[in-house]
Image: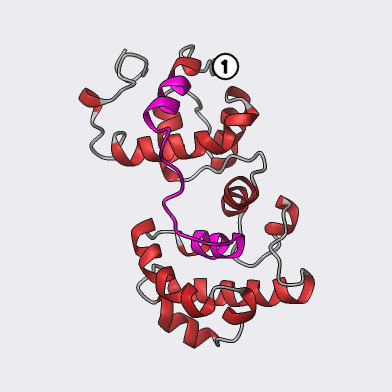
């Protein structure tokens, strides 16, 4: 098997994405790092618009771990039941609130090692909280980023962790958090999973799928 060679136009692609999506940031709505954490936990297999509909109401009365911990798991289930996998998410969020209160004084920890100890929090969620919530260098890989990275020739990794490693090698650390949003928005607006809009893609002269 030949060694993977990343797209030689990677720097040009990044510059174009930075320009096209300069004004686009997180789609999830939140007012604190804790609310961001909960929103990201809810977002698995659920689109961001649906998560925002849930959290706009949920965070009015239960926007802190102290408040949210007052709900029983069935009560929390009822408030997030329009979200995919809501039963498992309710259980994990309730357990995470207890752990934050018991071990972290109600504050969200800011290391990946501590974040992945929280029930229901994997590497992707931890990386989003680190980069978006704390402004620390991290690059979360979701399904959009995984797809776009492969199509643009940034990675051939078979797992999100492998793709993350490839992206972190190709993208300057200072741009990791921003690139996370560039790739997501490009995947949502242009590079759709089933019907990519290649004709109107700002990267069509750089994309290996079209060269």
Which quarter of the picture shows residue 55? bottom left
Foreground pick, 173 / 3: 173
Quadrant placement of the N terminus? top right
Foreground pick, 20 / 6: 20
Quadrant placement of the C terminus? top left
Foreground pick, 203 / 31: 31
What is the secondary structure assignment of the residue under circle 1?
A: loop
Residue 122: image x %, image y %? Answer: 61, 56
Which quarter of the picture shows residue 53? bottom left
Residue 5: image x %, image y %? Answer: 53, 15
Q: Which residue is mark 1?
A: 3
Determine whether 153 is above or below 75 in the image: above
Q: Going 36% across and 35% down the picture, which residue do you hit?
A: 186
Q: Residue furthest left?
A: 199
Residue 57: image x %, image y %? Answer: 41, 75
Determine whether 174 is above or below 45 in the image: above
Range covered by the magenta-colored residues? 13-40
Residue 190: image x %, image y %? Answer: 29, 34
> For the residue carrying disc 1, how many other residues have a C-alpha within 10 Å: few (<14), some (14-19), or many (20+)?
few
């Amino acid at each position: 098997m030949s060694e993977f060679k990343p797209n030689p136009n990677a720097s040009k692609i990044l510059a174009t994405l930075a320009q096209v999506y300069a004004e686009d940031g997180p789609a999830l709505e939140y007012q604190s790092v804790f609310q961001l954490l909960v929103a990201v936990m809810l977002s698995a297999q659920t689109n961001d618009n649906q998560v925002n509909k849930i959290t706009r109401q949920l965070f009015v009365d239960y926007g802190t771990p102290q408040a949210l911990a007052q709900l029983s798991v069935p009560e929390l289930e009822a408030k997030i039941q329009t979200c995919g996998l809501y039963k498992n998410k309710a259980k994990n969020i309730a357990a995470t609130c207890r752990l934050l209160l018991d071990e972290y004084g109600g504050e969200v920890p800011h290391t990946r090692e501590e974040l992945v100890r929280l029930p229901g929090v994997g590497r992707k969620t931890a990386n989003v909280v680190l980069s978006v919530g704390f402004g620390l260098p991290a690059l979360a890989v979701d399904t959009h980023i995984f797809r776009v990275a492969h199509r643009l020739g940034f990675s051939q990794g078979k797992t999100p962790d492998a793709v993350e490693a490839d992206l972190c090698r190709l993208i300057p650390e200072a741009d990791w958090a921003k690139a996370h949003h560039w790739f997501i928005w490009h995947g949502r607006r242009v590079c759709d999973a089933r019907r990519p809009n290649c004709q109107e893609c700002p990267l069509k002269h750089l994309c290996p799928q079209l060269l």
